[in-house]
Image: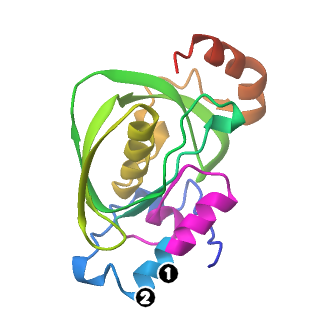
């Protein structure tokens, strides 16, 4: 496995719509290697998700592994998920605003509204169809990574930049207030 270079905001690949992966190629050595390298890269940089465009591959592949939020224990861990050619449907119009960061936009955080629950249809790492509902933090991460496949970043979803903050300032000024008001 290799740690891949992460594309940073400004790289044109982050603004392109990623290409679907032909189902017949998912089990190929190249795609399986990319998936393993994406997982290793996500873990190396402490991310909870990573999309192929973030590692310079314009393909509809995301890997997600939501660890507990910054060691605070406020988020339940999720198992590794590989989503190829994901399609999302909104389950309800209920929006939740919460903090997000991104490996492609290092050292910044901002509050982003996302749908509380989505229906996910995708192919897994084995090429088999999967379908499930995701809610809360898992739904947030899936929507964030899905946006990368559409050429969008979380900044595009922010209603206001008033909460946009560098990570040290987030820890100093915002995190305590966020933890106090976070219902879990």
Crowd class of label 1 (few under 14; some 14 to 19; many from 20; radius 10 Å): some
Q: Residue at x 66, y 52 (%)?
A: 46
Q: Residue at x 65, y 72 (%)?
A: 3
Q: Quadrant of residue 69?
A: top right
Q: Which residue is mark 1?
A: 33
> In the image, residue 157 lies at what x, y percent?
41, 34
Residue beneath the point at 24% across and 77% down = 22
Query: Is residue 112 shown left or right of residue 45?
Result: left
CB atoms of marks 2 and 1 within 8 Å: yes
Q: Secondary structure at mark 2?
A: helix
Which residue is identified by label 2?
29
Question: Is 55 part of what is drawn in magenta?
Answer: yes
Residue 173, label in figure: none
* Residue 118: image location, x then y, percent: 27, 38
Tag 1 secondary structure = helix
* Quadrant into which the N terminus falls: bottom right
Where are the magenta residues, as a range? 36-59
At which x and y percent is residue 95?
34, 23
Image quarter of residue 18: bottom left
Above or below, 80 against 119 in this view is below
Q: Nearer the viewer, residue 78 or 115?
A: 78
Whole-number angstrom distance, CA of label 2 to CA of label 1: 6 Å
Dot 2 crowding, Cα within 10 Å, few <14, some 14–19, many 20+: few
């Amino acid at each position: 496995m290799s740690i891949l270079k992460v594309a940073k905001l400004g790289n044109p690949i982050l603004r392109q719509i990623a290409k679907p992966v032909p189902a017949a190629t998912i089990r190929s050595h190249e795609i399986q290697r990319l998936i393993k390298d994406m997982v290793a890269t996500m873990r190396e940089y402490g991310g909870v998700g990573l999309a192929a465009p973030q590692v310079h591959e314009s393909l509809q592949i995301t890997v997600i592994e939501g660890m507990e939020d910054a060691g605070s224990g406020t988020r339940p861990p999720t198992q590794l998920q590989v989503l190829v050619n994901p399609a999302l449907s909104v389950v309800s119009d209920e929006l939740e605003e919460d903090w997000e960061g991104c490996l492609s936009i290092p050292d910044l955080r901002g509050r982003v509204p996302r749908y509380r629950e989505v229906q996910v249809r995708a192919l897994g790492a084995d090429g088999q169809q999967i379908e499930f509902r995701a809610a809360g933090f898992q739904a947030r991460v899936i929507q964030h990574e899905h946006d990368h496949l559409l050429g969008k970043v979380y900044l595009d979803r922010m209603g206001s930049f008033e909460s946009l903050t560098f990570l040290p300032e987030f820890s100093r000024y915002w995190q305590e207030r966020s933890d106090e008001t976070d219902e879990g």
